[in-house]
Image: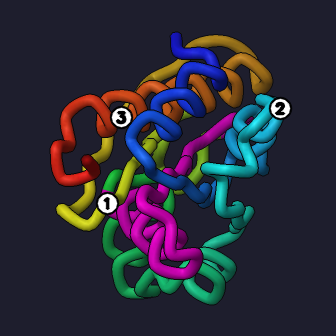
């Protein structure tokens, strides 16, 4: 999995910035990024929106979308990523939502994680089913989010 310094270097090389919208990771994606010296040149900020009402209030996620798709969904992850990108003016928004456990949530099993990236060209998301305890699921979600940022940077020529 990608290391935060790889992500920061890729953002610097592309002249891009990032902001995070986090649920189950509780700020761990942003924390991983800002642990890298020089991250202040590329990290715009982060919003932890742990509950459905905070996703709506802080990130502009439509409550009707949350009701229809559930908070643990690719659609909500994409809306979270778009919301944080728009709120911060970052080039990329990255979001995490999922179930770290110990119990399933909203019909989603423990370990189900959705990560998303938003950029001006649109959103992309991926679903992951991560095994292990709460900390393993959260760590896996951070890795998945960083990997999706790198993938988005590598494939998006509009950021050049």
Name the residue rendered at 58%, 75% in the picture.
88
Residue at the location (44% across, 25% down)?
147
Reply above or below: 6 against 121.
above
Magenta stretch encompasses residue 84? yes
Q: Which residue is mark 2?
A: 35
Secondary structure of the residue carrying tag 1 is strand
Q: Which residue is mark 1?
A: 119
Image: 85 above or below 158: below
Q: In the depicted view, which residue is nearer to us: 45 or 51?
A: 45
| Residue 127 circle label | 3
* Span shown in magenta: 75-103
Rendered location of residue 9, percent (x, y)? 55, 27
- Does the magenta segment cover residue 74? no
Earlier in the chain: of badge 2 and badge 3, it is: 2
Q: Is residue 16 left or right of residue 102?
A: left
Q: Is residue 25 left or right of residue 116?
A: right
Q: Position of residue 128 (x, y in %)?
A: 41, 27
The one nearer the camera, 125 or 4, is: 4
């Amino acid at each position: 999995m990608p290391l935060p310094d790889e992500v920061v270097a890729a953002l610097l090389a592309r002249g891009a910035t990032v902001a995070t919208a986090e649920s189950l990771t509780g700020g761990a994606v942003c924390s991983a990024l800002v642990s890298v010296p020089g991250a202040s040149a590329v990290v715009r900020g982060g919003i932890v929106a742990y509950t459905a009402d905070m996703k709506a209030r802080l990130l502009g996620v439509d409550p009707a979308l949350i009701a229809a798709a559930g908070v643990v969904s690719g659609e909500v992850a994409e809306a979270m990523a778009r919301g944080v990108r728009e709120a911060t003016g970052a080039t990329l928004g990255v979001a995490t939502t999922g179930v770290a456990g110990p119990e399933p949530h909203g019909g989603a099993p423990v370990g189900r994680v959705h990560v998303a990236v938003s950029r001006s060209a649109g959103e992309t998301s991926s679903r992951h089913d991560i095994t292990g305890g709460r900390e393993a699921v959260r760590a896996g979600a951070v890795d998945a989010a960083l990997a999706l940022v790198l993938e988005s940077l590598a494939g998006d020529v509009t950021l050049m």
